Image: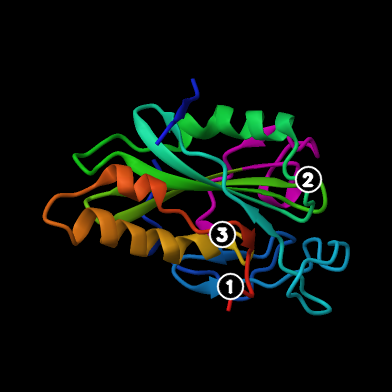
Amino acid sequence: MASTTFSASPDPRETAPHPGETAPHAMATAPDAMATAPDDRGTTPDVPGTSAGFREKYLTVPPPIEVAGRHIKRYHVTADPAGIAPEVERAAYAILPRLLPETDGTPPAGFVVLHRGGDDGAYLNVYSWVWDNVLQFGGAAAGQPVLGCPDRDPTHFVVPGRPWIGCVWELPPILHERDAWVRHLLAPDTPDLKAYLADSLPEGTTGDRS
């Protein structure tokens, strides 16, 4: 698989959830508590397979990249079918190296979810495989004061340091990536990193895939 080269955070399972906490980004707190809030609901263009009130978003899958010696699969989430603006994408991937852990002998791979909110917010969720079968999380955000961003510039990414692992639009790739890691790295007698990198959740929407 062709790759493009662009040139730690605590285990979320150890962080207690914060029930009842709300924010415009509707993030989930590790391990499974979910905050519910408006974000850009009601302003999102209709996406196939959605209902009134809550709307799924578009999910696109750019090619993997290699950053700091790690192979990174990519998922982009947006309400706009045109995708994420190039300047937001460049700014997000510029901060990515700060969110990657040191290698520990685990095949150096992971995946990111880059989400452009319907307001000024942009969110980069970074999931890295460590300790053979564990996901480590790191996150950055831009344009969202609730997360400590200094302004509403969607290209000005900072690292909030919160334990929130993703909102409802950002979580769908995680199950697929878990299964792909087992399928290609853990179950076979010979791990196949190349096959893992080629195995992504298909493009479409963030939900309603039945």
* Residue type at the position of mark 3: Gly
Q: Say left or right for 194 vs 156.
A: left
Name the residue furthest left: 189
Magenta region: 141-165
Asked if the stretch drawn in magenta spans residue 150, the answer is yes
Q: Which mark is residue 82?
A: 2
The residue labelled by disc 1 is 34
Q: Residue at x 44, y 31 (%)?
A: 3
Is 70 on the left-hand or right-hand side of 97? left
Q: Please report whichever mark, 1 or 3, sits nearer to the chain's N-terminal start.
A: 1
Residue 91 image offset from top left, x and y in percent: 65, 29
Q: Which numbered disc, 3 or 2, marks the residue that appears first in the sequence?
A: 2
**Any mark on residue 126, and which?**
none
Residue designated by label 3: 166
Q: Position of residue 169 (x, y in %)?
A: 64, 63
Q: CA distance from mark 1 to mark 3?
A: 9 Å
Mark 1: amino acid: Met
One can see residue 103 in this view: yes
| Residue 126 seen anywhere in this rendered image of the structure | no
Task: Determine whether label 3 and label 2 are within 8 Å by CB.
Answer: no
Question: In percent of the image, x 22 and y 39: which residue is there?
Answer: 104
Residue placed furthest toward the top: 7
Is 202 above or below relative to 64?
below
Check disc 1 and report its element: helix, strand or loop.
strand
Residue drawn at point x = 42 percent, y = 30 percent: 66
Identify which amino acid the numbered label 2 is placed on.
Answer: Ala
Relative to 44, is 175 on the left or the right?
left
Dominant SS in magenta: loop
